[in-house]
Structure formats: structure tokens, C-alpha cells
Image (tube, rainbow, N blue to C red):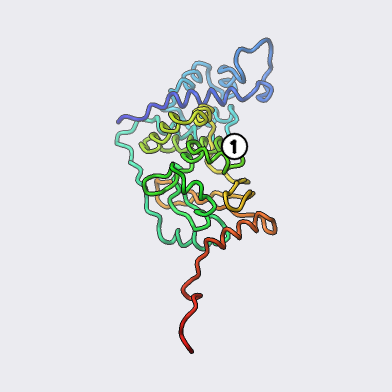
Amino acid sequence: MDRPDNRADIRDFLASRRAKITPEQAGLPTSGRRRVPGLRREEVAVLAGVSTEWYTRLEKGHISGVSEDVLDAVAQALRLDEDERTYLFDLARAARPTGRAPARRKDVEIPPRVQWLLDSMTLSSAFVRNGRMDIVAGNPLARALHAPMFESDTTDKHGRPNIARFIFLDPGAQSFYVDWDHATVTTAALLRAEAGREPHDRALRELIGELSTLSPEFRTQWAAHDVRIRHDGIKRLRHPEIGDLELTYQSLDLPLSHRTVHNLTIYTAEPGTSHEDRLRLLASWTATPSPAAEPTNDPR
């Protein structure tokens, strides 16, 4: 059975990680002028406890059949973080021969219980995205907070936004995200991790091809081979109606099937701040009275 030819991804990823580590950081002696940034291949081989010939072959993309112990030694030699290590193992798994066709990933319907969960968060923006960064469910505040994305021409024919398309292809994203440059780095890194995890996802490959063709910024970030799987922190937004917001966000894995990766992302504001006041104002605009709270004409 054919498998994706990911040798170029393996080569470029390992070379890019090797270039980031200096001999001093690795505890190796240095002497004379160096023609390459970071470590040489033979130095990585020494650190990993393998021959230079073997590591050179690995960095050329011949990763099929390599044991997990050896991959782990290479990961330690290159000082890969947890996300980068996971990505390397995903590349190795994709390169292994298999006797059957890979399972085709199918999008799953969001269960009502998940929508109920989202809707219960009235003072937090909450949405669910898949690995391709499509927003597949959200609460009213998420839609209001990310109105520029939901109203963008980059949404699909069903009005479903894609975070990556908005960030890289809609000029308005550069004013909506105060830290737009950082958003491009994180978004490309998230897609890089997904590409390693799901090499057979045709829609993902088409998205990456589209962004590579239309966005110079994406091409630059994609070539960096940075990887991000989990993320949280501070997000600064410039909302067209309520102004600047500084929000904390947390992303959590949301298992909905044994194959498809979904992520629950929650934005909230620090209590007692002006940002909380603005978020509350936006939430009040999206609130609708429940039937129980509606006035009645009963004369009693």
C-alpha cells in the first residue's frame, strides 16, 4: 500500500532543529570556523549514540523501520520539546509500510451535549475546532467576539470559518489580532503538527496548498518547520465594536471519536479589569431572554 512520501518533511524538520542548537549548548568542544549553523550531523550522531552514516541516512528521510528507542535518542540529542517529539514519531509512523489502506478520516457531527456545554458558558467565548482549524461549533459570545472571522469572505459556503484562512488570507486579520505576527507563527505550527498526525487528510493538504500559494507569510512560517500541539496564553484582540481586549485563552483536547482530533478553546477576561467589563458588554448584546423570563399577558 502506498504511503505518503514524507522524506522532505523529515529532512527539513531534523535539519532545522539541528541548526538551532550550538555546540556550547550541547556541551561539545568547538574549534575553527564552522560552515553550518548549529550542530553538524556527526555531532548529532555522537550525542544520539549512532553512527554518522546512520544519522545521515535518517536525516535524508529514511525513517521507516527505525526503533522508538533510537528515535527517542535523536529527539534528546536535538533537544526536541514534547510537541516536536510527538511530530517526529508521527512522521515515522506515517513512513512505515502498511498492508491496508489507511482509514479515511471523517468529520463527525458535534453532539448536542457539546453545544449545551458551549451555550452554558455565558461570560466566556468558547468554540470547538478540528485539526484543520475549522470552527465547527461555538457559543453566541464566540461568534460575537470573532465577528470579523465569521463575517469574512474566507468562510466556506456554509458560513463556517477557518482560523488559518482568516489569519493568512483576510487583510482584516492584521488589525483584529494585535499580535498578528505571533498568530501566524502559532497557526502554521498547529497545522504542521496536524499534517504529521494526519498525512492522508486530503482536505488538509488542499488547505496547506492554498495557503502556500496565496500567502507569502504562510510560506515563510511553513518553511520554519515549527510544531505546536497544545497552546494557551494571552490573546490581544481589537474588536470593531468594543475596542481592545486582552483575554486569557485555554485549549483543551475534546475527544469526540477515536480518530478525529477536536479542540475546545475558551477565552475569558481577568476579573475586575476593563477587559472583563467589555467582554460582559459584548455578552449582554448576545444574550436572549429565556421563555420563562418573558412577560406574560396573564391578567392574574
Residue 99 quadrant? top left
State the residue at coordinates (61%, 60%): 280
Q: Residue at x 49, y 57 (%)?
A: 139
SS class of the residue under badge 1?
helix
Of residues 168 and 51, the one nearer the viewer is 168
**Up-down: is 60 above or below 136?**
above
Question: Can you say which quadrant of the picture contains the N terminus?
Answer: top left
> Residue 128, how many percent across, how many down?
47, 51
| Image-based side of 155 in relation to 237, left or right | left
Tell me the residue at 51%/39% (across/down): 167
Q: Position of residue 37 (x, y in %)?
A: 61, 18
Q: Kindly indicate the quadrant of the structure image that contains residue 33.
A: top right
Q: Residues within 10 Å of mark 1 (few under 14, many from 20)?
A: few
The x and y percentages for residue 105 are 35, 43
- Image coordinates of residue 236 in percent, x first then y, are 62, 45
Say if 28 sits above or below 159 in the image: above
Residue at the outermost bottom position: 300
Q: Which residue is mark 1?
A: 182
Residue type, numbered disc 1: His
The answer to whether one can see residue 197 in this image is: yes
Numbered marks: total: 1
With respect to residue 77, does 195 lie above or below?
below
Identified at 62% across, 20% down, the residue is 38
Whether residue 70 can be seen here: no
53 vs 167, nearest the viewer: 167
